[in-house]
Structures are given as structure tokens and as C-alpha cells.
């Protein structure tokens, strides 16, 4: 199933750093965007027709526009490079905002830990938490001030000034100690949110999971896992309609369903965006995605059809 696309226009382009630019997008029909929660991301169809996912870094209360930040990646497949060529007035298309990273409603304190471009979803969370007057801190790690997008905004806005800590040039071997200094501020009812490079997020989990619990450390991934969806034994998938399909080694559930005319909403097809997540009624999934939380995986009642497989001979699934 193709995503529902919303025509938008680039209203503003800001060079946040030498390699990161932010885009403010407005609807071409002048309407408001649908409501979304902090931590959401959106599919963006760029000038070359490639669809990529970008976190929303503006305030969710402002539905007149969407804000994204794009880092130019020299080894990318063209998505980030193309969005670094657009100018104010250019036309693009976006999908409906959707959430994989959300704020816990019952947290006594929220700790946001960002690494580099990983600040983007956490900036949206900081906006919402500040508007709620909730207890939170944002610790933003970057190699230097010149490489830290939105640093000026975070320093200048009154609602962020006492809650944001910019940390530039922290040596890798000092990182665990810096995080350990933050742990005494947390309780078992606190929640931690992190986004950044894989090694960075692993350090955050190591530092805070013993304090708040594994399921209260929330991670947003930007890159797909290395394990391929095709590796593993063949298995059977049965839909809740009764239709049955064999999933051979080397093929994904999503691919087999598509070949048989079964439409499933999809976007990245790399286990990152969560668009193809569907329900599991029977059987045990072999999760290989980067979009479901630890709690979602433990529940075993949903899976990403693009990359995940089965630990049992059969899965019965319900398409959302």
C-alpha cells in the first residue's frame, strides 16, 4: 500500500551547520498538518523521488508547519544529498507523521540524551515537555559547537535555558563517567530517551538501564540492523483471513505478500520506519527491526514484516 502523500512546499531553509540544514515545510493547500506526538517522524519524498524518514524537531503544538533536519551523508544513497539542493519555494511530498518514540505519560522525570544529528527527535520532545512544564533535562553531545545543530536555539530560548546542557568534545573514554554523573537524578519511575550513533546509544543503555529498567530506556535508530531479512529457515505465514503463504529463506514476508497481491503499508523496508508493523496472533517472531521497543518485542504481538522472520514454523498475522 503506498503512503498517503501530502503535497508541501519548502517555506524556509536554514544551514544549521556545514553539513546539517533544517527545512520548514508547509502544506500547499494551506491546511494544518494532522496532530502528532513528540518523537514522531515523517516520510519525505525528495526531488529524486526517493523516500526517506526524518524526525520532526519542531513543537507538536504548531500544526501550521513541519520542521525536519537533514544531515548530508557522503555515503548515502542520494536522499540526504538531494534535500541539500532544495530551496525555499520548492515542492516536496510527505507522509502522515507517525511515532515509534513517544513520551511516557507516567514518568516523574524525563532525561533526553542526544548525540549529533540524533538531537532532532529529542528537540521535539523538549518542546513538548517545556510546554507541559514537565521535569526534564536534555544533554546534547557533539564533537564541537560548529557541528551542533540548533545549539543557538537551545541556548537562547528561555524555556530551555536551565534544562539543556551542551557538551562539546567529550572524549570517548570519558563518556561513561559523564553519564554516570546523571544517574543519581533518576528514579525507577524516570524515563530515558536517546538518539545518535549506535555506539553512543549503547553507552546510554548501559549507564541507565540498571537505574530505570530496560523498558524505560527508549531508543530511536537511524540505520538498519546488519542482519539481513533473508537469513534463516523457511516458515509459513497465515493471515487472519485464512490465506497461507510460504516464506522461503532469502525472502521477506513483505516481499512474498506483495508478490501475491497483498497490500501492506510500507516505506523504508529496512526495519527502521515501522510502517509495515503488523499484529502477531500466533507463533514467535524473530525480531530484526530497529523500530519496536524492548517492551513491544517482549510482548510478541507485533512485528516488522520487512525484515523480521519466525522462530516457529508458523506465524499467524493480522495486517494493520
Image (cartoon, helix red, strand yellow):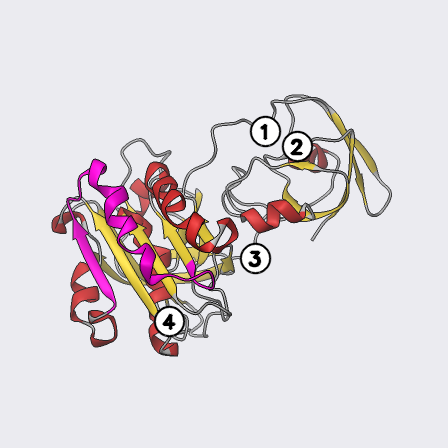
Q: Nearer the N terminus, badge 1 or badge 4? A: 4
- Which residue is identified by label 2? 309
- The residue that appears at 36% across and 64% down in the rendered structure is 124
Report the front residue among 87 and 216: 216
Q: Nearer the N terminus, badge 2 or badge 4? A: 4
- Which residue is identified by label 1? 229
Residue 110 in picture, x, y percent from top left? 39, 64
Disc 2: CA contacts within 10 A as few (<14), some (14-19) or many (>=20): many
Tell me which segment is drawn in magenta.
163-191
Q: Nearer the N terminus, badge 3 or badge 2? A: 3
Disc 3: CA contacts within 10 A as few (<14), some (14-19) or many (>=20): few
Report the front residue among 117 and 298: 298
- The residue that appears at 73% across and 42% down in the rendered structure is 262
Disc 1: CA contacts within 10 A as few (<14), some (14-19) or many (>=20): many
Q: Is residue 147 left or right of residue 30?
A: left
CB-based contact (under 8 Å), mark 2 and mark 1: yes
Q: Looking at the image, is mark 3 or mark 2 nearer the viewer?
A: 2
Disc 4: CA contacts within 10 A as few (<14), some (14-19) or many (>=20): many
Real-space CA distance between mark 2 and mark 1, rounded to the nearest whole angstrom: 7 Å
- Which residue is identified by label 4? 129
Secondary structure beneath dot 4 equals helix
Q: Looking at the image, is mark 1 or mark 4 nearer the viewer?
A: 4
Task: Return the mark for residue 4.
Answer: 3
Q: Nearer the N terminus, badge 2 or badge 1? A: 1
Is residue 2 visible to us here?
A: no
Q: Looking at the image, is mark 2 or mark 4 nearer the viewer?
A: 4
Report the front residue among 166 and 86: 166
Real-space CA distance between mark 3 and mark 4, rounded to the nearest whole angstrom: 29 Å
Q: Is residue 153 left or right of residue 65?
A: left
Q: Looking at the image, is mark 3 or mark 4 nearer the viewer?
A: 4
Q: Is 251 placed above or below 295 here?
A: above
Amino acid at each position: 500500500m503506498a503512503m498517503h502523500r501530502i503535497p508541501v512546499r519548502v517555506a524556509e531553509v536554514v544551514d544549521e551547520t556545514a553539513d546539517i540544514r533544517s527545512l520548514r515545510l508547509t502544506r500547499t493547500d494551506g491546511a494544518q498538518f494532522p496532530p502528532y506526538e513528540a518523537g514522531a517522524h515523517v516520510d519525505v519524498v525528495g526531488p529524486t523521488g526517493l523516500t526517506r524518514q526524518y524526525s520532526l524537531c519542531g513543537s507538536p503544538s504548531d500544526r501550521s508547519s513541519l520542521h525536519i533536519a537533514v544531515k548530508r551523508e557522503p555515503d548515502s544513497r542520494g536522499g540526504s544529498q538531494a534535500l541539500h539542493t532544495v530551496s525555499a519555494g520548492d515542492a516536496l511530498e510527505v507522509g502522515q507523521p507517525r511515532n515509534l518514540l513517544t513520551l511516557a505519560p507516567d514518568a516523574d522525570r524525563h532525561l533526553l540524551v542526544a548525540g549529533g544529528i540524533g538531537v532532532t527527535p529529542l528537540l521535539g520532545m523538549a518542546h513538548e515537555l517545556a510546554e507541559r512544564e514537565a521535569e526534564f533535562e536534555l544533554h546534547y553531545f557533539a564533537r564541537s559547537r560548529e557541528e551542533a545543530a540548533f545549539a543557538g536555539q537551545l541556548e537562547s530560548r528561555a524555556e530551555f535555558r536551565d534544562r539543556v546542557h551542551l557538551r562539546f568534545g567529550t572524549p570517548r573514554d570519558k563518556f561513561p563517567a559523564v553519564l554516570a554523573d546523571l544517574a543519581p537524578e533518576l528514579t525507577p519511575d524516570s524515563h530515558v530517551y536517546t538518539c545518535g550513533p549506535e555506539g553512543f546509544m549503547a553507552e546510554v543503555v548501559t549507564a541507565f538501564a540498571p537505574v530505570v529498567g530496560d523498558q524505560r530506556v527508549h531508543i530511536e535508530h537511524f540505520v538498519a540492523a546488519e542482519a539481513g531479512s533473508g537469513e534463516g529457515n523457511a516458515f509459513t505465514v497465515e493471515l487472519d483471513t485464512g490465506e497461507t503463504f510460504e516464506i522461503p529463506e532469502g525472502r521477506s514476508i513483505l516481499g512474498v505478500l506483495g508478490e501475491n497481491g497483498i497490500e501492506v503499508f510500507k516505506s523504508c523496508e529496512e526495519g527502521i520506519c515501522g510502517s509495515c508493523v503488523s499484529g502477531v496472533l500466533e507463533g514467535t517472531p524473530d525480531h530484526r527491526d530497529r523500530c519496536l521497543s524492548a517492551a513491544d518485542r517482549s510482548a510478541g504481538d507485533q512485528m516488522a514484516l520487512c525484515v523480521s522472520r519466525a522462530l516457529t514454523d508458523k506465524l499467524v498475522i493480522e495486517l494493520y
